[in-house]
Amino acid sequence: MKNILFFCLCLSGLLFSQETHKVHIPDGQVKNRAFKVFVKDADISLDMSPKIEFIRNPKSDNYYEKEAFEAAGNQTITIKTTAGLQTWTGSLLLFDFSDVDISLFNPSLKGLIKISWTVKGDAVNVMPEKHIYLGHPIAAFLWATVIILIFLALFNFCMEDNKNEPLGQKLLSVVSTANKNLSLSLVQLALWTLVIGYSFTVIALLTAHIPDIPDSLIILMGLSVTTATVGHYQSKRFVREKLKGHKDSPEENENANHLKVNLSSILSIEMAGPKNQRRRVFSLGKAQNLYWTLIAIIIFIIKSIQEAQLWDVPNELVALMGISQAGFLSRKQSEISEQEKIKNQKES
């Protein structure tokens, strides 16, 4: 009886003396970059032969085994959990999965992970409970592009009124005003919608879950929608004041329907010239607004791809774009006021 009691005490002491390590594997990892694994409360070096097993199917021998090519102990990271932000200290391991075969029809590969290393000859094994996804970026980009092309095909099919026009003219007509001038506010709205939607689709395909949408993107989309709405109202008011008292002939209306979109109008504005003739001149306000929009979009695409999550645009950049759009709308409002002043002078 004493021997049995002694054996149970030794066994329980052995079990409770073993360290339990937690593993954090960031989402959005792709095969052509270093696969990162963080092991909490562990000081692991390459001498301990750290390995990883990517198990595609637990019921078969379908798995990949890799040795770490880099191990760094005494590292600190901040992770987001259900309980909030937590700071972990432990070891960062890097693995190479570039030779893993993933089909182009499958943008991400689902599997279980097992991490192992040796401490003084004893093996230590850690296996996270949840599945992880190893992304294939080329496949994700291809599938996202296919989705965009399907959307464009549906758009082309639905535009029955302009069925004889090429697709490019149909797309431009969506972001242009009634007088066939490109609307900068509508172009901005279309660009942000396309870029955010495309990035959202790529990241969702890579990580196999819905990515978080930062508040800054919601603010940016709100600014774009507001600017597009106010700008559209201003454009209609401007055209109405300019054409008040003038009736177009049926031939003029027919010709106006077949005019091509004026691409230069995105960076120019109409001003009164000699003998009340209208002429287009370069607009610094429009150029500034378009410049900051393109800069923000380029940075957004690069950061979102690098981090495999929608980039949280800094508040300073959001404010800068808001000021630029406010200046753009103020300039358009001054054009309307000038047009009304000219009209009042003629009537008096």
Image (cartoon, helix red, strand yellow):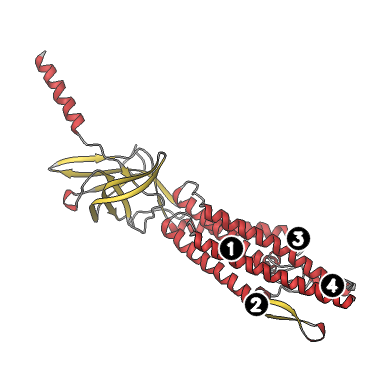
Q: Which residue in the structure is indicated by mark 1?
A: 322
Q: Position of residue 307 (x, y in %)?
A: 42, 57
Tell me, yes or no, whether the two marked residues, 4 and 1, touch with CB atoms within 8 Å.
Answer: no
Q: Nearer the viewer, mark 3 or mark 1?
A: 1
Q: Nearer the viewer, mark 3 or mark 2?
A: 2
Q: Earlier in the sequence, mark 2 or mark 4?
A: 4
Foreground disc of the pair 4, 1: 1
Q: Secondary structure at mark 1?
A: helix
**Amino acid on which disc 3 is placed:** Glu
Q: CA distance from mark 4 to mark 3?
A: 29 Å
Amino acid carrying mark 2 in the image: Ser
Classify mark 4: helix, strand or loop: helix
Q: Which residue is label 3 attached to?
A: 160
Q: Is residue 144 left or right of residue 87?
A: right
* Quadrant assignment, res 4: top left
Could you tell whether 104 is left or right of 64 in the image? right
Residue 243 is tagged as: 4
- Report the residue that reaches farthest toward the left: 3
Marks 2 and 1: in contact by CB < 8 Å? no
Mark 2 — residue?
A: 283
Give me the C-alpha separation between circle 3 and circle 1: 36 Å
Q: Position of residue 212 (x, y in %)?
A: 49, 49
- Going from N to C along the chain, the mark reached first, 4 or 1, is 4
Q: Is residue 6 visible?
A: yes
Q: Earlier in the sequence, mark 3 or mark 2?
A: 3
Q: Residue furthest front?
A: 348
Secondary structure beneath dot 3 equals loop
Query: Would you say 309 lies left or right of 336 here?
Result: left
